[in-house]
Amino acid sequence: MNKKRNSRTSALFLKKFWAVLLCFPFACRMQGAPVVFTVDPSQSHVTVSGTVAAYGLFSAPIAQQTPGSLTAAFGGAINADLTGTNIQFTGTSLVEAQTNSTPQQPAPGGTSGSAPADYGGLATQKTFLADITVTVAIRNVGLDLISPVLPLSNGSFATSSLEFLFSTNAGNSIDYAVSYPVQNGTITLAGNSMLDTGSAATLSITGATEILTIPVSAIFTETSGSTSGTSLVMVGQIVASLQIPPPIIDSIVVSNQMVTLSVSGVTAQSKVLASTDLIHWSAQDSVISTLSGRTLFAFPATNTVEFFKIQQ
């Protein structure tokens, strides 16, 4: 009798020991956890178009000032809160445009000359008084992202309520110079916001990396001052990644011929693999539920000794 009890205890110990040990770093994420996505400049580009207006009389489309001056790469970080079925952008992010390789006119404050800028634009218009030229240089662009809780459906979510804010932690300004009548100055963007009107964003998993892709389609319009009516249309995409920590089997309970694994750090696609020899693995049909932020996988106990691991 004692020998049989000791044998059962050893089997359960081995089962729990190996289950925890074999919790390899497959793709997963903590449920309900705050996370930080790193923006990839090689895949994140936003192009500016729109209209330059002045005095209520001048209005002309923005053209590039130098080759490629209306497109910028973006880097930085995005703060979010993730659950198994939702994503929310919680603010205090900073997604920053990278400076154009060619200095743009005008210099800061709209003064003569050129200086480094993220974007450079030019607008011209013939009038009966003069040929008017307006140069604009957009500098220190840094965006924040906020949103309500957005439901995830098959790895995508709507962006219609996603808001881009010109961060107060970045300069965010448009320096401009008008040739006639001569005027120069700066439009401050910091503190203003734009709703995204783009298509659905995606959240996908590649290996142990979660990829966030947000299409950008937003409009900012200046509504006051001599440049009232000036609008910026920002179109492109932001791609960011998150390295996903491995899942953890927190506990194993065997009761009434049922095994229940309590696991933290899983995704909606995670599943239990079972083996009796550590060589051949098969998916274990499980009844899945949640308790205190952890996922419970329950299934019949069919073998004396069995090993488990969590796979995406």
Image (cartoon, rainbow, N blue to C red):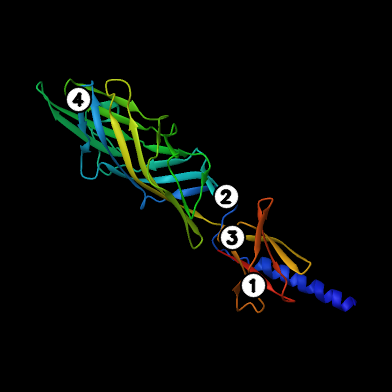
The three-letter amino acid code for the residue at tag 2 is Thr
Can I make out residue 270 in this image?
yes
Identify the mark at residue 274; answer none if there is no mark: 1
In the rendered image, which quarter is residue 297 located in? bottom right
* Residues packed near mark 3 inside 10 Å, few (<14), some (14 to 19) or many (20 plus): many
User: Which quarter shows the N terminus?
Assistant: bottom right
Which quarter of the figure is the C terminus placed in? bottom right
Badge 3 amino acid: Pro
Residue at x 36%, y 38% (from the top left corner): 218
Q: Measure the C-alpha gap from mark 1 to mark 4.
A: 71 Å
Marks 2 and 3 in Cβ contact (< 8 Å):
no
Q: Secondary structure at mark 4?
A: strand
Q: Which structural element holds mark 2?
A: loop
Image height of 15 relative to 80, above or below: below
Q: Which residue is mark 4?
A: 58
User: Does the residue at mark 3 contact the one at mark 4 (Cβ under 8 Å)?
Assistant: no
Residue furthest left in the image: 128
Mark closest to the chain's N terminus, 1 or 4: 4
Identity of the amino acid at label 4?
Phe
- The residue under label 3 is 246
Q: Position of residue 47 (x, y in %)?
A: 30, 43
Q: CA distance from mark 2 to mark 1?
A: 26 Å
The local secondary structure at tag 3 comes to: loop
Residue 190 at x, y percent in the picture: 40, 30
Q: Which tag, 2 or 4, sits closer to the chain's start?
A: 4
Residue 194, quarter of picture: top left
Q: Which residue is mark 2?
A: 83
